[in-house]
Each structure stands twice: as C-alpha cells, then as structure tokens.
Image: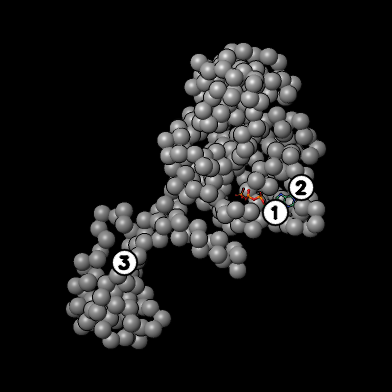
Amino acid sequence: MADILKIEDLRKSYAGGFEALKGVSLRIREGEILALLGPNGAGKTTLISTICGITTPTGGHVEVGGHDILKDYRAARSMIGLVPQEINLEPFEKVINTVRFSRGLFGKPADDAALERILRQLSLWDKKDSQIRALSGGMKRRVLIAKALSHEPRVLFLDEPTAGVDVELRKDMWQIVAGLKADGVTIILTTHYIEEAEAIADRIGVIAKGELLLVEEKDKLMARMGKKELEVQLSEPISSVPASLQSQALRLSADGSALIYTYDTNAERTGITKLLSEVAAAGLVLRDVVTRQSSLEDIFVDLVQEGAA
Ligand SMILES: Nc1ncnc2c1ncn2[C@@H]1O[C@H](COP(=O)(O)OP(=O)(O)OP(=O)(O)O)[C@@H](O)[C@H]1O
C-alpha cells in the first residue's frame, strides 16, 4: 500500500522555547491503524495538532495524500478527520445538524445519504433528532467521530478515544475503529493503554519527550513478547559455557553463576527438557530455575526510561 502520510523531521517549539517535537519522521500506509503510545506530555497531541493544522510546526515537512500541510493546506486538511480528546459539542443542537454543519465547514456539498451512512455505521441513526445533551457519554463520543467523518476523510486521527471510559465502551470503540478500517480509512490513534494498542493496531509507535522511540509491526512486537528467558542458576559459578552445551542458544550471566536460555513460548517445543538433561550431563549442579517474560509493557517502560535518560 502507498504511504498516505509522510512526516519528515517534524519539529515544534512552543513560545518560550519548549521543544515538544524534536524531529519526528514517520510514514503511514493507506488503510493501516497506527497506535501512538506515550506517557503524559510526550507530544502525542502536539503531533496530531500539527498534522491537522491546528498548531504550526517550527520545522520539518508533512504531506497528506501528496499535499503539503502548509503550502496546500486546504487539500491536506480535507483528507483528515480529527476526533479531539475533549467533548466539545453544542448541547442544544440535534445530532444530525451537528454533523451536517461539520460537513459544511469543509465546503462539501450537502449529502444526506452520506450522513445517513455515517450515522448508521456509528449506531446513531435512531438518535439523529436527539439533542446532544440527551445523549450518554458514549454516544457523545460517537457524535465526535461522526463529525470527524462528515466530510469523508481518508485519514482519521483519534486523540485518546477511550480515556476515562468503561471497559464496555472501550470495546465498542475498538469495534468502531475496526469497522472504519474495513471501509479503508487510515487511522492514527493516541492512547495510554497498552492493551488498546495490542487489541487494534497494525503498528505501534512509542513517543516520549518529543521523540519517536520505536515504530514496529504489532505482530513483531508480540513475537518479541512471546520470547521467554529461562535462567538456570548454578550451585558453582563457571567461566564459560561447557563445550557440550555450545549448540544451545545459551549465554552465561556476567558473574558466571547462571546460564540464560531464550526460547519462544509459541513454538511447539521449547527445548527446556533437553537443555536441563544436557546441563546435568555436563556435570553442572542446579541451584534454581527462574523464568522471565518480556511484555509490551516492559518494552514500553524500558524505552520510555531510556528516552528519558
Ligand atoms: N500551547 C502550548 N504552549 C506551551 N507548551 C505546550 C503547549 N501545548 C503543549 N505544551 C507542552 O508540550 C508537551 C507535549 O504536550 P502534548 O499535549 O502534545 O502531550 P501528550 O503526549 O498529548 O500528553 P497527554 O497524554 O497528557 O495528552 C507538554 O510538556 C506540554 O506541556
């Protein structure tokens, strides 16, 4: 798939000199879901606001569907829908009018069939004549999405779509996102929730202190998560891995007191039984055996700490 969004060395310093984005480069393929994970203040909202033209970059270059966000602002912006973090709706307005108005803001001709399709997709059609104030919090969030989709954008940004919502509503939101992807919409969402990124993203980006620390296919990250380490602690330290064990994927701990074996938990055979019998055959005496699993959370925390160092 072609890249629908190209971000090159994007920088943003706020008045006063604070650098919220320190040169972010990223490409997003059409039709993918990218989750941007990062702690508070990492720069996620700044990144989205800059791409959407709400904040002016201080350096770098962004193209949406081949349109430069500065030189060709209107064309770039018309390809983007933004669902903001905060609910900013007019309480006395009817749902349908709110969505119709948003479409008009983009200079798109009225198209009630398109609005009906969007409202049905978000299960809001039977609420189209309700006033916003009469809707539940979950429905208001859906209205925000309907507004963002009203001009039929190809790229949708969701800024923390499930912050502070209950588990059921979160799952609803995941289903909505999956439905939009099936329609070919490219989705970039920010989140604090690792399980949200795991549940819906094709790729995961980690951002901290204005820098993109990692962007990787979720499946590859999950495969990394599937790796486990077995630490075979020895009663006596050794200076090197015995020759009879050299064929195994083993390394010696720095102090020589343990052999560390990495294996794939998803594999049919872990090789642990064979390893332990070979360790015994090599004349080594075990003190203890410990296993460790790296999770996406560990990867995330390590990265963010390294980034902060
Ligand atoms: N208008 C502004 N003027 C000055 N500093 C700002 C402005 N907007 C954001 N910042 C600072 O830029 C940094 C990044 O903020 P941003 O809102 O992009 O982070 P975030 O990753 O979205 O955080 P959160 O998860 O809390 O929403 C923060 O330190 C914030 O205080």
Q: Tell me if mark 3 has few (under 14), some (14-19) or many (20+) residues whose alpha carbon lies within 10 angstroms of its own.
A: few
Decide if ligand 1 comes within 8 Å of the CB at mark 1: no
User: Few, some or many C-alpha atoms within 10 Å of disc 2 (few <14, some 14-19, many ≥20)?
Assistant: many
Q: Disc 2 and disc 3: Cα gap in Å?
A: 47 Å
Q: Position of residue 168 (x, y in %)?
A: 42, 35
Residue position for label 2: 57
Kind of residue at badge 2: Pro
User: Is the residue 71 above or below the residue 198 in the image?
Assistant: above
Q: In this rendering, would 291 be left or right of 133?
A: left
Label disc, if present, on residue 75 of the rendered structure: none
Q: Residues within 10 Å of mark 1 (few under 14, many from 20)?
A: many
CA gap between label 3 and label 1 equals 39 Å
Residue displayed at 54% across by 61% down: 303
Nearer the N terminus, badge 3 or badge 1?
A: 1
- Nearer-the-camera pick, 200 or 91: 91
In x, y percent, where is residue 107? 74, 21
In the rendered structure, the answer to whether residue 230 lies left or right of residue 218 reads left
91 up-or-down from 244: above or below: above
The residue to which callout 3 is attached is 291
- 2 or 3: tag closer to the N-terminus: 2
What colouring method underlies this structural image? one colour
Q: Secondary structure at mark 2?
A: loop
Residues marked 1 and 2 touching at CB (< 8 Å): yes
Q: Which residue is mark 1?
A: 21
Q: Nearer the viewer, residue 297 or 284?
A: 297
Separation (CA) of disc 1 from disc 2? 9 Å
Residue under the image location 79 percent in, 58 percent down: 17
Quadrant, the C terminus: bottom right
